[in-house]
Amino acid sequence: MDAPERNGTRTTVTQRAIEQIKSKIAAGELRPGQRLPTERDLAAELGLSRNSMREAIRALTVMGVLEARHGAGIYVTRLEPKDLLETFGVVAEISRGSSLIDLLRVRRILEPAATAIAAARIDEATLETVRSHLDRMAHCERVEDFVAADLAFHQTIVGAAGNPALEAIVAGLSTRTFRARVWRGQRDSGAIPRMRLEHERIYRALLARDPEAARAAAAVHIGEVEDWLRNNIDSIG
């Protein structure tokens, strides 16, 4: 059992506990949906203190790897991308300054690719859903309503690409709070009509089942947002 830890040592030992639990999951010793041994038993098995094990379990719970079920113990989650990447969105929620631009640049790499894939495989029902979100944007007066329609528009398209990991990452790069900060500023600058047109171009490329046109339309749209953000970063923090 590890000796009582000081601050630096505790961090190291806790990290070791985290890695050991992750290794057991990766090796299949702990499977999705399986209940963990008790904190005492797991600490004894891995040769660690209960304090370190408790901190490791808490950290893995925050990461979405484990979940606490009231009165039933600690379980491995389903380990699906949307669960594991849920905390990724916190970065977009709290980032400021140049970090926001960095996040948008990553989105500009990933989302056009997802939109191109969606154009090749989207079905009629999903296209109708995308169209409904686009129509909502045309009639929104409140920024909050526009943001909701915008978010649903892009999420539906990326979801049509059929890659849950990609969907979760893109969703984390542009959360509702982040979009609200940007759209509020764009409304004040009169950019909303142009943004609506850019969304229309994305939809038309999807309707034509044209992956390259869809990729280009999405890249132009996100590039315009990035340019606006770069020029107005001080006003939105």
Image: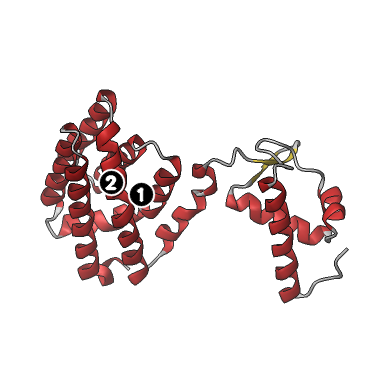
- Sequence order check, earlier mark of 2 and 1: 2
The numbered disc on residue 40 is none
**Residue 118 in picture, x, y percent from top left:** 29, 37
Q: Disc 2 on helix, strand or loop?
A: helix
Q: What is the quadrant of the C terminus in the image?
A: bottom left
Q: Residue at x 17, y 48 (%)?
A: 217
61 vs 156: above or below: below
**Residue 16 in picture, x, y percent from top left:** 73, 63
Q: Residue at x 74, y 59 (%)?
A: 17
Is any atom of residue 97 visible in this view?
A: no
Provide the residue designation for mark 2.
Answer: 147
Could you say which is closer to the camera, residue 165 or residue 51? 165
Q: What is the quadrant of the N terminus in the image?
A: bottom right
User: In the image as oriented, which residue stretches furthest toward the top?
Assistant: 125
Amino acid carrying label 2: it is: Val
120 vs 58, left or right, is left
Tell me the quarter of the picture where residue 104 sits.
bottom left
**Residue 141 in picture, x, y percent from top left:** 18, 43
**Residue 125 in picture, x, y percent from top left:** 28, 24
Q: Residue at x 37, y 49 (%)?
A: 170
The numbered disc on residue 176 is 1
82 vs 71, left or right, is left
158 vs 207, left or right, is right
Q: Are marks 2 and 1 in contact (CB under 8 Å)?
A: yes
Say few, some or many: other residues with alpha carbon within 10 Å of mark 2 (under 14 / 14 to 19 / 20 or more).
Answer: many
Disc 2 and disc 1: Cα gap in Å? 7 Å
181 vs 58, left or right, is left
Amino acid carrying label 1: it is: Arg
209 vs 30: above or below: above
Say few, some or many: other residues with alpha carbon within 10 Å of mark 1 (under 14 / 14 to 19 / 20 or more).
Answer: some
